[in-house]
């Protein structure tokens, strides 16, 4: 490895250590090198040893020594960074006039909003912003059996948390009378008919591309059957179908459903209606009457474009331009309600705010910032390529937002006792952040400390260690409980640097560590780790929801006075 590259690695190691309590890790520096110098991706084995050696040397320096070397050799690290505008990209729309673009987000209130909803809402919102247009939130509430006010409210709360603003908020069910008018118009033009075939026969005929006898009935008979759908027919007895093309290769066009009978009680309209429009019919009519110019949605709806266009053509109504993008999911984190609901019912996850879930509530509780979600989604661009992202792709964006605002605290797990003789002070003041001005905290101390069990097992009699922010200690006794003598400032070369918690003020909390819910198709029974740890009393002064970086552990969100949730490294 040439000297220039070694200098660059040392700079990265010093900067990362300085920003994270004086310690860094091989894999972090390796990631940074491969990210900035992709030519080394084929030489990982060759540079691993050098990186490990440089990281080890940097970790042995005291915080003061690291800062001194940075000042002398890499002063640019200490210069406050201007916020760099992330690359955000959506393709331009052709032939549009500024101020004339109207987009919409039409979620169905049948579950809690998730990362996929966020993508659809953000893309449509951003296009409206790009062209000074309008953005509509339209609750697609035409299935009383599945929809609830609870979900309606959760969607609005989630979108508000994301910072998404709407010019108009409405519900699809506001326009039920218009749907009825358009349905009757299709019947009277011979472009729709009431089908009373059994469900199995309808499916069989669609597979075999055969028309049923109902499609041969005249307009008068179809109008009579439509009236019967209002009161006489039971759910499943009759549906209104669009006269499409039973020979079509696109199965969506094989005389699809326009209306069906549902006797469920609607969460706002009660039992006023029992004939409800299908999604395809409702979205086509709504997009046209709402003045939507561009309708962007995930690519599973792409085959339905032909149908919505055909419905609007049959009614001589204006059609929006439709665009499609890939669904967004994370590996091992399902967004499907069919998967999540049974997990809740079986007690495998707590609720929709479980930090293992990619719901907006789950991401919020885990400590993911809404700004990071937006930046992450915009970084993906507008593509139809499948997006099954690793969660750490979102973490990388989140880290940029939380790092400068996260109070640094000490925390120890599997605590072991350390008694220090000759301690000349009764308190110590430590900065809450190595760079940002987040103030200082005063920690009362006596001779009794806790250190992490992982560190304790590496400490032997005769060694010197450094307690971060306090000083050097010479170990006089190892074993189950350690003892040492305070030295103070001294040589920090080849000395283990560790965090600590004063026993007299130690505050016990539960640390929740979420992991991937699924390994492939299998539920991960170890997807939620809980460990008991000790931290500083300053934890109690932080507000619920604040982000903390526990030194040498990672970023965490304060969930309550007695619990924190691990966000990411």
Image: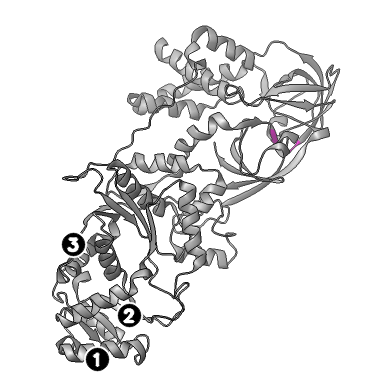
Whichever of callouts 1 and 2 sits on the residue coming sooner in the sequence is: 1
Residue 178 or residue 1, whichever sits in front: 178
Residue stretch in magenta: 411-415
Disc 2 packing (10 Å; few <14; some 14–19; many ≥20): many
The answer to whether marks 3 and 1 mark residues whose Cβ atoms lie closer than 8 Å is: no
Disc 2: which residue: 260
Disc 3: which residue: 318
Disc 3 packing (10 Å; few <14; some 14–19; many ≥20): some
Above or below, 5 against 504 in this view is above
Q: In 3D space, how far apart are the residues under numbered discs 1 and 2 (Cα atoms)?
A: 16 Å
Q: In 3D space, how far apart are the residues under numbered discs 3 and 1 (Cα atoms)?
A: 29 Å
Residue 93 or residue 494, whichever sits in front: 93
Of discs 2 and 3, which sits in the foreground?
A: 3
The image quadrant of residue 234 is bottom left
| Residue 509 painted magenta | no
Q: Position of 342 compared to 140: left or right? A: right
Residue 231, percent from left and from top: 36, 90
The coloring applied to the image is one colour
Q: In terms of secondary structure, where does tag 2 sit?
A: strand
Of discs 1 and 2, which sits in the foreground?
A: 1
Q: Position of 305 compared to 449: left or right? A: left
- Principal secondary structure, stretch drawn in magenta: strand
The residue located at (44%, 72%) in the rendering is: 146
Disc 1: which residue: 224
Regarding residue 196, the answer to whether it shows in the image is no
């Amino acid at each position: 490895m040439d000297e220039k590259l070694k200098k660059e690695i040392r700079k990265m190691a010093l900067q990362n250590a300085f920003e994270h309590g004086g310690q860094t890790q091989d894999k972090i520096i390796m990631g940074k090198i491969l990210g900035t110098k992709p030519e080394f991706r084929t030489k990982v084995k060759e540079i691993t040893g050098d990186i490990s050696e440089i990281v080890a040397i940097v970790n042995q320096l005291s915080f003061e020594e690291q800062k001194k070397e940075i000042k002398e050799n890499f002063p640019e690290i200490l210069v406050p960074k201007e916020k760099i505008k992330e690359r955000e990209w959506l393709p331009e729309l052709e032939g549009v006039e500024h101020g004339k673009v109207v987009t919409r987000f039409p979620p169905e209130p049948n579950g809690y909003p998730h990362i996929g909803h966020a993508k659809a809402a953000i893309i449509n919102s951003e296009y409206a912003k790009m062209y000074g247009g309008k953005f509509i939130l339209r609750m697609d509430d035409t299935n009383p059996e599945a929809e609830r006010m609870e979900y309606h409210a959760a969607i609005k709360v989630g979108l508000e948390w994301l910072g998404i603003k709407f010019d108009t908020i409405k519900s699809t069910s506001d326009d039920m009378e218009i749907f009825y008018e358009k349905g009757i118009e299709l019947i009277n033009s011979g472009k729709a008919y009431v089908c009373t075939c059994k469900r199995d026969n309808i499916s069989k005929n669609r597979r075999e591309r055969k028309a049923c006898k109902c499609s041969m009935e005249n307009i008068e008979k179809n109008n009579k059957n439509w009236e019967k759908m209002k009161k006489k027919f039971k759910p499943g007895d009759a549906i209104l179908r669009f006269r499409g093309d039973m020979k079509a290769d696109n199965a969506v066009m094989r005389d699809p459903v326009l209306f069906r009978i549902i006797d469920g009680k609607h969460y706002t309209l009660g039992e006023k209606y029992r004939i409800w429009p299908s999604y395809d019919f409702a979205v086509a009519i709504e997009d046209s009457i709402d003045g939507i110019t561009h309708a962007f949605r995930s690519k599973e709806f792409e085959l339905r474009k032909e149908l919505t266009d055909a419905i609007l053509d049959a009614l001589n109504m204006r059609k929006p331009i439709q665009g499609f993008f890939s669904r967004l999911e994370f590996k091992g984190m399902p967004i499907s309600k069919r998967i999540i609901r049974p997990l809740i019912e079986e007690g495998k996850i707590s609720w929709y705010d479980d930090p293992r879930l990619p719901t907006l509530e789950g991401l919020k509780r885990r400590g993911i910032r809404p700004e990071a979600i937006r930046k992450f989604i915009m970084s993906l661009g507008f593509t139809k390529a499948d997006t099954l992202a690793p969660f750490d792709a979102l973490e990388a964006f989140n880290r940029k937002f939380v790092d400068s605002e996260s109070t640094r605290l000490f925390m120890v797990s599997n605590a072991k006792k350390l008694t220090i003789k000759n301690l000349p002070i009764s308190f110590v003041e430590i900065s809450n952040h190595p760079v940002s001005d987040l103030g200082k905290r005063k920690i009362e101390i006596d001779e009794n400390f806790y250190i992490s069990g992982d560190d304790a097992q590496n400490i032997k009699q005769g060694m010197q260690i450094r307690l971060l922010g306090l000083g050097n200690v010479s170990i006089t006794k190892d074993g189950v409980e350690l003892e040492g003598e305070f030295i103070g400032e001294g040589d920090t070369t080849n000395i283990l640097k560790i965090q600590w918690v004063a026993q007299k003020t130690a505050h016990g909390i539960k640390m929740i560590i979420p992991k991937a819910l699924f390994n492939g198709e299998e539920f991960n029974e170890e997807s939620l780790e809980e460990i008991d740890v000790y931290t500083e009393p300053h934890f109690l002064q932080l507000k619920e929801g604040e982000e903390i970086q526990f030194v040498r552990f990672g970023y965490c969100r304060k969930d309550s006075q007695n619990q924190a949730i691990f966000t990411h490294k």
